[in-house]
Amino acid sequence: MSDASGPDARRALLAVVFAVGLVTAAAAAPALAGQAPLGGLDSPPAPGDVPELLRQIPGADALLGDASGQSGDFEFGASAFGALTPGETASVGGPMSPGQRANATEAHFVAEADESRYWRTEAYTTYTGSGWERQQVNRVQPPRPVTERPIEWNEVTLSRPATSLPTPWRPINLTCAGGCPSVSLTPTSGISASAAFTEGQTYRVQSIEALSAPSVLDDVRVAGSVVDTEYTTVETTDRVRERAAEVVGDADNRYDAARRVEQYLEANKTYSLTDVPEPGDQITDQFLFEQDAGYCEYFATAMTTMLRAQDVPARYVVGYAGGEYVGDGKYLVRGADAHAWVEVYFEDVGWVRFDPTPGDARESARDELHEDERDFEVSLNRTAVPGERVTATVTTADLPARDVALVVNGDRVGQTDANGTVAFTVPYAEQLRVSVETTVNVTASSGSLASAPVGGDRAYSVASPTVAQQDDGNDSAQTFDVNADVRFAFDGDVEPGAERTLTVTVAGRPFPDAAVSVGGVEQGRTDENGRIAVRIPEDASGVLDVTASRDDLSETTTYPVDDLAVAVSPSLVAPFPGTTATARVTSGGEPVSGAAVTVAGETVGETDADGAVAFEIPLTRAPAVVATASEKTTTAYLGWVLPSAAAAVLAALGALAGVVLAAQKRGVTPRGVANALVAAARGATSYVVGALVGFADSLDDLAAEFRAATADGWRGVLAWLASLPGRVRVPDVRGWLAGLAATAGVGRERDAGAAGEPRAETNANSADGRLRTVWRRFVAVVGVERWETKTPAEVAREAVERGFPERPVDALTAAFRDAAYGGRAEDAHLDRAEEALDSVRGADREEDEQ
């Protein structure tokens, strides 16, 4: 609904200008490399890019824009909500999918900025009813020069690959260290990369500060504009148009019209990511008249549609809003920060952002969406020692997590600072269970993007490269090991009724305020130096239990009152070198735990609660086993080590000699064993080859039988199938094993009577060679090519097909197959093969004479 004919005339002129321009010259968007200026959103091509003829047309300079529309061919998906790789189309609405929820906590990029910002990736031009599309449109340069606006630089580091780069509005320059991949401005002035920027890539973008002051915007009329008509036309329902007219009312300028629609949606619709129906084919109509709640896609789509219904140029924009401030001027932007909003065009200014989505509700829902799933990592600057100060660093997505509470063993120990660090005193415990609580505002945004405080208590997985850790079985936390090595030292001998000073240390440092008991009698608590005066019970004997405990850390050790004794028990009947033995340390017949034991000068460990420690017996004549506890020492010697080793060697040699003698008595010689093995291997190979050849022949026979059965129709096939089970034969494994044993026996017999059997061996070999010669002559007569690669059955079948008599061919084939795959050739096989070959030759000669 234009309020003057002027805009229509300008649109017609614009169409003519671009029709001529596209024929006469290609106005390409500036290519960026290394440090290539973008020229600004809606900026015209460089003077050399447009023919001078077109610039002679009055008003052309104010109307010409870059019509190249070089946006690249990106088809990355149906939805562009928060996308770093948006597609040509974007769906709108519907409940959040599990994939979107999982994506909410993932880091998308980190931006350096002086405040929380909107980060624009792309805009869409055409409303389809159920979503948006990108169409070729013209960019229009606002008359206000760039130099009249503040300019700033921001740095962005991608956490995921991107083909549409997030930037503030409106970008005019882009630089990359070492050069940027090829990028260009899209028709809607997003920055598109022809090759995706990779994860971890950093770029700097220069942008012009947007103008949004009402005093600058309120002198533009409501309807009519020089921008492309695609931004002012929309296909929607009549009741949407009526509601839009009702909301805009008597607004006398474009800014007031946009603000009325924005405020109407904020006041009449609530924000929800879950309480939404499946989208229909008219999203705006459904949202305005059938829904009570929706999220940013609904709000932005409705506002854009309603403004276009009033001939106000508007477009649907996607990107990100806000982010988590992580200190040092950096904002971590996640999937949960994805957002959609509206841009309205104002002459003399350009595109101005409007956001109809309720800000506080959106931020609260976003925090609820990802705060309970944020992944924190905790590292310690040193090994944890009870009573010592350590500094923990908490990060999320490899960035400092500030203003989060650290909980150690159930107690909140502090809140992280701007660097994500917090110092605390290690509690007296053997392990640390670390968790993180997000009970403060972790987003620290400004303006309309400020986050609402969110409470919650969740333990997150932690990792520290400097401290040993283990999973405690709870998915929400892990534990750090603590160096809680408690030691005791008396200032004299431990004797019944004596008064002594006991010093207790933990990890080599004093163990203060520890409750101490000796022999079950409470003695008091240690001072700041870990010392305490104690009295040894009068009835103390054997070993004395000494315990020190504080909070969750408790340690008990045993002190020998009587002299130490050590006994060694080999694991076998004798102390053979390389086997294990156990040393047991006692005092007065009672086990002493924690006693240090060395064997042949090498430390093997400390005794356990039973006073025992295992070790490997060294190859030494009589290794010394020394036990030390409470400044008392005892030594025992493990004898018979070398004699036991010598006895074991002699026994092994005797056993081997016995085996050799027994074998000789039975006529078994090394040569006989070798022959038996060779014969067994040869028999196994022959059996396998014969089985494979027989299997192949059986398949050929089955195929021939099946073809014959099919000639009789389905009854013949059924009869053939019914005959198969009765023809199945199980391999005679038992017979083969018996033959194998017989073959091995023959090998042994040959070795025993080698002098009298060389002639028989020679005859067998001769028969083999003659039979193979007969087969080669047969193949030559038939003329079979590459016969070495064919089975005997295949050669025979080819001979019959060529007209040779079937019976002699089958006889010759059977003789060769029986001899080749069943064992050595026999005279009967050879005679039968030669007779068959003579028959084949005779048939061949008769055929030649005819």
Image (spheres, rainbow, N blue to C red):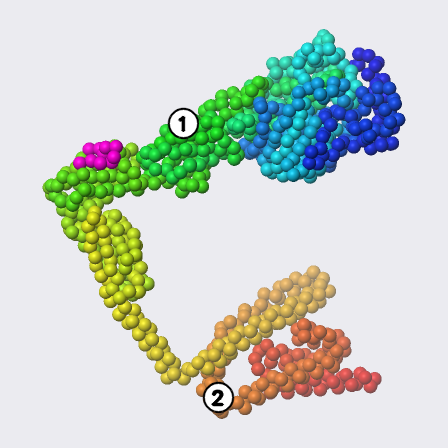
Position above or below: 180 against 764 = above
Local packing at callout 1 (Cα closer than 10 Å; few below 14, some 14-19, many 20+) is: some
Marks 2, 1: nearer the viewer: 1
- Residue 526 counted in the magenta span: yes
Name which residue lies at 70% across and 13% down: 217
Residue under numbered circle 2: 754
Give whichever of discs 2 and 1 has the lower sequence position: 1
> Where does residue 248 sit, x and y in percent of width and height?
70, 11
| Left or right, 722 with reference to 427 | right
* 382 or 323, nearer to the observer: 382
| Residue at figure coordinates x 15%, y 49% from the top left | 562
**Is 588 within the magenta?**
no
Q: Does residue 404 lie above or below 649 as drawn?
A: above
In space, the residues marked 2 and 1 are separated at their CA atoms by: 93 Å
* Badge 2 element: helix
User: How many numbered badges does the structure rendering display?
Assistant: 2
Q: Is residue 822 visible?
A: yes
Residue placed at 72% from the left, 29% from the top?
Answer: 38
User: Residue 279: in sight, yes or no?
Assistant: no
Dot 1 amino acid type: Gly
Name the amino acid type tagged 2.
Ala
Q: Which residues are magenta?
A: 524-533
- In the image: residue 846, left or right of residue 283: right
Q: Position of residue 850 (x, y in %)?
A: 83, 84
Which residue is label 1 attached to? 414
- Decide which of 841, 522 is in the foreground and name it: 522
